[in-house]
Every structure is written in structure tokens, then in C-alpha cells.
Amino acid sequence: MRKSIISFVGAGLLAGASVYAAAADGTFSAQAQGQGGPVPVTVTIKNKQITNISVGPNKETVGIGAVAAPKMASRIINAQSLNVDAISGATVTSEAVLAAVKDCLVQSGADLKVWNKASPQKAALLQKSLDADILVIGGGGAGMISAINASQQGAKVVLLEKMDFLGGASGICAGGMLIEGSKLQKDLGVKDDTPEKFVSDMLANGRNLNNKEILDVYARNVGATVDWLVAQGVQLRTEGGVQKRAEFKTPRLLLLKGGCPGYAQTLRELVQKSGAQVLLGTRASELIVKDGKIAGASAQGDGVKYTINAKAVILATGGYGANRDMLEGSLKQTLYYGPVSSTGDGHKMAMKVGAGMQLMPYAKIYYNGLEVAPGTAKSTLTGNAAALSLGAIMVDKNGKRVVNEKGTGRSIVTAQSKAPGGQLYLVMDEPTFKVFRNGIKNNGVSPEEVDKWLAQNGKGTPLFAHGATLEEAARNAGLNASALKQTVAQFNSFVAKGKDEAFGRTKDNLKAAISDKGPYYVVEQKPRFATTMGSVQLSKTMQVLDKSGRVIPGLYAAGEVANCVHGDDSAPAANVAWVATSAKLASDAAVKAVKAAK
């Protein structure tokens, strides 16, 4: 929980702002439901204007909702109106602040029709020019790491982020990091991993569609990048040793302490210390080309139109999952789980200057989605990992298991696609459901949301059905009750034997039988995607190549916009590690080029 109370005092109200009708001056308090729980606000009204909005302690996501709440308060004060834009990427938090302020105005006796009028027309855009050694476009994990690393090497860095906060996908990822070749991996007892093993596993997972040249660069640099991150203060959970997943022959995965929200916050703090100039709410629109070289970009934000001149530009703009027009085939109908900022801006800017592209039809499909709104998913990944290590199983609508629930993600997604309705269902007893429920908090699913869905008991979406008996839970979920009962009995017999005779789930993942005492829970599992595989073509030094394979001078790329190493499917934790590795390499190369040109 955030413990501080943030106040915004309207001493600098917009010149010419209308004085709106409020029946009484005074201080009024209210709260509304945000992403992580109630968001309390206190509004002070004086001389019929809002002079102060205090946002109280809340559980909104660090670096995202926690930033959005006070920004939203500031917008309301400056506009002296409720008719203001939500903070991009934090709509739920923005709406909570807006609703609570509206409640306070009602308490004051204000005329809401007046307060819902648009604020005065904005002034014409100012023109501003900035100079930098390196311009980084995009403030997610790749952009933040690029800015930190380049600044530490003495480069003058400008970092643009179109959202009102830094973080991108790095703040909502699954929270794992591959550590192949790192000192940390060796210190934890795994001494036999090699770049060759890493490449082999990645090619198998990506159906050999990976860019092999860049994948080799990844394999030979990820270890050093992890050690660099640790030296910067990024913390990984080492208890229990290095993890092995079905996609890997060798243990090479650790979870981030504090998950991705904690990781992103560490990076934000490092950016702040780095000295890089950060422009939030500022969207790059076009790369500047001079004498055949990328020499900066045009951007706009906060009433200013920028021309940013730079000796090198690093694209770190993320993917295009939130842009349905850029998706192909079945992806257009697949639930999206990812930042609203992933609209392909960097891909489009790169293509406009002639960049070659690859793997554009592909995205990483996960099986563990909750449909929280039409076309939109939340993830249950962390909860699944914990529950499936205990007594949970997954079944289809017929109440039957169809896959090894602890197998590769690809195998589960394939089985899911063949199941009736294209979805599966997670079945748990009460002790396992408690573990699952706690785990999905790390995926941004709040206890309040779970309670609401449980109350619907299968009559709404997402489906969170339950019952005192297995048959009752199955009926509430719309599953074949008798078949599910037989499936559970069979699974429990496999647990007793220590061998899954149906699908080969390993003994380590047969630790607990499903209880013979209720209640029982059934949770939907729908396919979702977050990470797009489409990528600019790259050189070994992260320079963007044109359609003929020639370097576009001055242009580098890192992160999801440069995702060619994965093939058509990314392995667990491979995205986070690639974002970091490519950002470190791109910024190293850009700094070297800038210094050589001086």
C-alpha cells in the first residue's frame, strides 16, 4: 500500500478558467474502486473552485496507477472540469479518481452539468528544439535500460515516452528472467549451460523461424547482461535454486523479486538517477533523415511540438498487440493482454524509412487468459504455476483432461485450440484455490475482482464457478459433472502411484491429490497474447537494416520491436531477458558510434 498522501493545490489554475457553480465551499471526501482497491480522495472547494485534491493511500500499481492518480487530480484542477482525458494506460485508476471527485462535488451541491463541460480551448502548440547524443524512443524496459546504460557512459540522452509514466510491458510481464551464462547461474550450481544449448532450446521452441544470427548474439550476451543488471540493483529470487521449465533442457530461469512491477520500479529509479532527460506524455511521430542518416525525430506532447536532433536513435517502442489493424489471421480475434501503448509506432516509423521486417504474423499465445472485457484478457500465469505444482488440473468442457498441464506452453495452447469452444478450465480444491488466488495478484488480478467474479458463480465473464461438491461446481461452470468426477478420481490415482499414465505429468508435479472435501472451484482458461514477434531486421550490433540488408545509419532497435530472436513463439522468461540484452547491446553500440564520430 502507498502510505503517502499526494495533494495538488490549484494555486496555478489555468488563466481564464470558468468559475463553476458549487453550492458550498468546504472539504469533501469520497472513494471509488480502482485497479487494486478503493482510491480515496479529498477535495477542497473555495470560492466555487476546486483548489486542492488529495489522493489518499491506495493499492494502485507502483509506477502506473500510483502515478496516474495524482496526475488525474492535477488535470481536473487545471481544467476546473470533469471533462478531462484519462491517463493513458491507467484508465481504471483515472476513472476511480474522476468518480470520487464527482462524488465530492455532489456532496458540495455543485451543478454537475456545468462541471462536465469541456475546459477552455488549449493554446497553440509551442515549438521546441532539443539536442542529444542519443535519442531513445519508448520508455518500457528496453528504453529505460538503454537510457541508463548510455547515460552511465557519458552520453547525453533524451528518453521519450508517449504514456504518462515509464514501464511499458516491463511492468506487467510474468516476472521471470533467463540467466544463461551469468555468474549468478554458476554461483547457484548450474555450471553446464552453454550458448549452444540455449540456441538449441530456443530454435526448438520457435519452430526454427528465429533469426539465427541474432539469436546467437543473444545467447552469448545474456549472461553478462544479467550480471550487469544485478550490479545495478535488480534483484532475482534465488531461493530454491535455478528453475528448469519444460522448454529448456537446462535450468536457467529465476523470478524477479517483486515481480515485474518491482523490476520496472527499480529501472524507473535508475533512470531518475542517470541524468537522462525524460519527456513523458510525448509521442514520437516521425524519424528525421539527413544526408541518408537518421538524425533524430519529431514528437509532440504537453502542448509542445519537439524537434529532437540526435547522433543516434534507439527504437524501443514495444510491439503492436493493441493495434488490431496490424494483426494478422486469428490474432485479430484472440484476447489481448498487454499495454495499450503497444500500437506499433516504432514498426511504422522504421518501415517509413525503409526498414526490413520479419515475423510480423506471429505473437506469443498463452493459454491462461481471463476475459475481463470483450477482446481483453488478464493473465493467471503466476497463479497457474503455483496451483498446477499442487493438485490442480485442467479439463475441457467435457470434463476431461486433454494435456500435460505442466508441459510446454505450445503443447497446452495446441490442446486448447482443439478443445470445444477453444478453451480449457482450471479445476481446484479449496487449499489449491487459495494458493492460486494469491498468485494471480502478481498478475494484476485484485481480490476485489475475484470476489465479484465468484459472486457471479459462472453466470458472467470471466468464469469463476464454485460449489460445495465437485458436481455442483461443474454444473455451475457448464461442464460435464459425471465426467469431471471420474477425471478427478483418475488423477488422484495417478498421484497415489506417482505416475501420470495419461499425459506424463512428472512426479514433481503430482504432489497433492484433489481433496475429497469441498468446496471446489472452476476457472476459465482462454487463449491470450501479449507479445508480438514481428521485428525490424537487425545487424549483430542492433542496427536496423533496410529491405536489402544494408544498415540504416544512426538507427538502432531493442526489445519487442526487435523480437526476431524468438521465432513464432517466445520461451518462458525469454522476452524479459531479450529486452534487457538487446537494450544493453544497442546502447553500447550507439555510444561507441557517437564517441567515434566526435
Image (tube, rainbow, N blue to C red):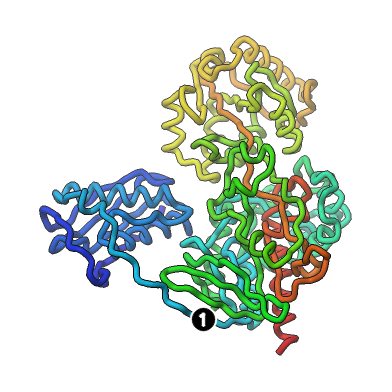
Q: Residue at x 63, y 71 (%)?
A: 287
Q: Residue at x 71, y 16 (%)?
A: 490
Query: In the displayed structure, does residue 597 sit left or right of residue 140?
Result: right
The residue that disc 1 covers is 129
- In the rendered view, tell whether residue 421 sits above or below residue 529: above
Which element is circle 1 on? Answer: strand
Q: Say few, some or many: other residues with alpha carbon within 10 Å of mark 1 (under 14 / 14 to 19 / 20 or more).
A: few
**Residue 162 seen:** yes
Which residue appears farthest toward the bottom when viewing the image? 598
Query: In the displayed structure, does residue 391 sit left or right of residue 302?
Result: right
Query: In the displayed structure, does residue 458 sit left or right of residue 200?
Result: left
Q: Position of residue 293 (x, y in %)?
A: 71, 77
Q: Residue at x 82, y 56 (%)?
A: 211
Q: What is the quadrant of residue 71 in the picture?
A: bottom left
In the image, 371 versus 581, the foreground residue is: 371
Q: Residue at x 23, y 56 (%)?
A: 43
Q: What amino acid does circle 1 point to?
A: Ser
Q: Count the marks.
A: 1
Viewport quadrant of the C terminus:
bottom right
